[in-house]
Amino acid sequence: MKRWRLLGLFICAALLPVLAYGQAKVGTAGVQFLKISPSCRAVGMGEAYVSVANDASAIWHNPGALARLEKSEAILSWIDYAAGLQYGYLGITQPVAKLNGTMAASVSYLTTDEMKETTPERPDGTGRTFTAGDVAIGVSYSQLLTDKFSVGGTVKMVSEMLADESATGWAADVGTYYETGWRSVRLAMLTSNFGPDMKFVEEGFPLPMNFTFGTSAYLINSKDREWWTGSDSVGTHALLTALAWSHPNDNLEVYNIGFEYGYMNTAFLRFGKKINGWKRVSWDDYREVINRGEDASNMNPFYEYPLFSENGTFFGNGASLGAGINLEKIGLKIDYAYNAIAFLDNIHRFSLGYRFNKRLF
């Protein structure tokens, strides 16, 4: 009975912030860099990671899970992103034994190369250049309420800059994490980027708010020699699977599925898929309906197609691959992920994780 009461509390605590979605404006949200995951492990698993996050990347994926970290950890990520963009992320965690919780801090940014300034009168350039960029600085805290249930949150200062103009605001993430105690099943929820609209020049725009629910479990764990094990530790062979569902304020619901095979908790292979539509409409069909002056609101060629697309690339439609090495003795994790963004460039990502031998202070 106590378990079910705790589960009810878990669900209520996570759903409360979702009630505020009615305040969001209809249309495209701004500061989209807040959607970029810094964890190559998570990206390799299709970002079905809200219930998996067990390292410093939980700062981004679920601050509610940070309290379960026993030692200080750090994550460093850098991406040579599509269209000449560069993305960077640094996060560090610090357990607080007296409070039975964990503090964390993070910074992320997205920048462009210098671009030529052009005007209608001088389309070849004015001789001036400009850049654009985004930055977010956050602090997090997570608290264990029981040995199986924890909550946490992050508050971020967010700034967006374009040439001589800028917009500044704040955003918050609230996450919960529940280890059910049955087999190895975990449940988690996250409300991310919740906050007031930001204003650029004279126009306001909403943040890219998102609600995510996820579950994960080991399907295979040779340590216990059974299918669907409940062990926290892993043996020579382990297969972790994760599922997630998210509801953004600027797109369709997204379904995530991810797998991670681990050998001796040292070498890992990963596969994931993000799906936000069940059938891709071709551009020709879409344009034909538009040209006839008919309503095409239920037709969108940007929707991802599950597993294999009809007129897009496999990786350009939400699929990803990843690999990783865990050098446990020295506390170093090296992760790689490969994916693509629609019809833009393929993206190779690398991230480093480090677990300190002891708490920093």
Image (spheres, grey):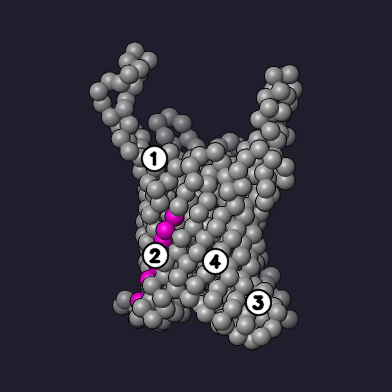
Q: In 3D space, how far apart are the residues under numbered discs 3 and 2 (Cα atoms)?
A: 26 Å
Q: Residue at point 64% right, 86% down?
A: 224
Task: Look at label 3 and name its amino acid.
Answer: Ile
Q: Is residue 260 left or right of residue 227?
A: left
Q: Which range is magenta?
A: 349-356
**The magenta stretch spans residue 309:** no
Q: Is residue 133 left or right of residue 59?
A: left
Q: Earlier in the sequence, mark 1 or mark 4?
A: 1
Residue beneath label 1, please? Answer: 84
Q: In the picture shown, does residue 125 fall above or below 342? A: above
View extreme (bottom): residue: 224
Say few, some or many: other residues with alpha carbon within 10 Å of mark 4 (under 14 / 14 to 19 / 20 or more).
many
Q: Is residue 244 visible?
A: no
Task: Look at label 4 and name its amino acid.
Answer: Leu
Residue beneath label 3, please? Answer: 220
Say few, some or many: other residues with alpha carbon within 10 Å of mark 2 (under 14 / 14 to 19 / 20 or more).
many
Which numbered disc, 1 or 4, marks the residue closer to the eye? 4
Q: Residue at point 39% right, 42% down?
A: 85
Residue beneath label 2, please? Answer: 352
Residue beneath label 4, please? Answer: 269
Task: Look at label 1 and name its amino acid.
Answer: Gly
